[in-house]
Amino acid sequence: MLMNSKTYIAAAFVALAFGAPAQADERYAPVRDQTVIKECGACHMVFQPQMLPAKSWSKIVDGLANHFGEDASLDADTARQIKAYLVKDAADAGWWGGKFMRGLSKTSAPLRITETPYWVREHNEEVPQRAWSDPKVKSKANCLACHSRADKGNYDDD
C-alpha cells in the first residue's frame, strides 16, 4: 500500500514527535552505546534492544555468569549501564509496542530472540530448514549470515 503525501507527513511527524525512527519495516536503530558495542560485540553481533522485552534484557544481563553456557560476567557498573541501555529501548518500551512483542504476553521474558513468535514466524515462512545446517550460517543467532547489514539495524531481505 502506498502512502499519500499527507499520510507520509503525518507518519513522519508522529515518528519525530515520539522519538520513533521513521524507517522501513525491517529496520531498527543501530546500537550506538560504545560500552554495549565493546562488551556484547566481543563475542557476538550486538543485537538491537527492540528485539526483546525489557524483562528479557534484565534477565540476560543479570545472568551473565551463565550466558548461554559461557561466563560473560562484567563489573557491576558496566552491567548496569548495558542493562539500562537495553531496557530503555526494549520491544515493550514505547507506547506503540514492537513487532517482537507480537504473540508475547506482557509477562513473557524469552531469553533468545530466535524463540520469539515474531522471529519464528518470519523465519519459518521464508527460510528453508536446511539453511540452519549450512556451515556459513552456523546458528540462528548469526543474523549477519543472511542480513549483511544487520549490525547496522537493517534486516531487509531485498
Image (spheres, grey):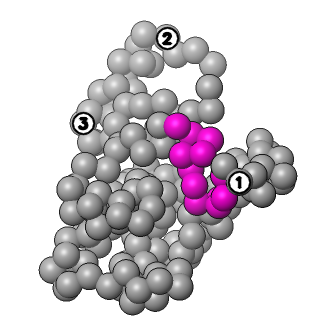
The amino acid type found where label 1 is placed reads Pro
Query: On screen, 29 above or below 89?
Result: above
Image quarter for residue 156?
Answer: top right
Q: Residues within 10 Å of mark 1 (few under 14, many from 20)?
A: few
Disc 3: which residue: 17
Q: How many marks?
A: 3
Q: Position of residue 10 (x, y in %)?
A: 36, 23
Name the residue: 77% across, 42% down: 126
The extreme left residue here reads 77
Mark nearer the N terminus (3 vs 2): 2
Q: Quick one: quadrant of the C terminus?
A: top right
Query: On screen, 63 above or below 102?
Result: below
Q: Is residue 142 magenta?
A: yes
Q: Is residue 92 magenta?
A: no
The amino acid type found where label 3 is placed reads Ala
Name the residue: 53% across, 85% down: 69
Mark nearer the N terminus (1 vs 3): 3
> Which label was assigned to residue 135?
1
Q: Is residue 56 left or right of residue 93?
A: right
Q: Are marks 1 and 3 in contact (CB under 8 Å)?
A: no
Which is more toward the observer, 72 or 36? 72
Could you give the CA–CA distance between mark 2 and mark 1, rounded to whole angstroms?
A: 45 Å
Name the residue: 47% across, 37% down: 149
Q: Are marks 3 and 2 in contact (CB under 8 Å)?
A: no
Q: Is residue 70 left or right of residue 145?
A: left
Q: Is residue 82 left or right of residue 70?
A: left
Disc 2: which residue: 4
Q: Which span of residues is magenta-colored?
A: 137-148
Which is more toward the observer, 94 or 90? 90
Mark nearer the N terminus (2 vs 1): 2
Which is more toward the observer, 56 or 42? 42
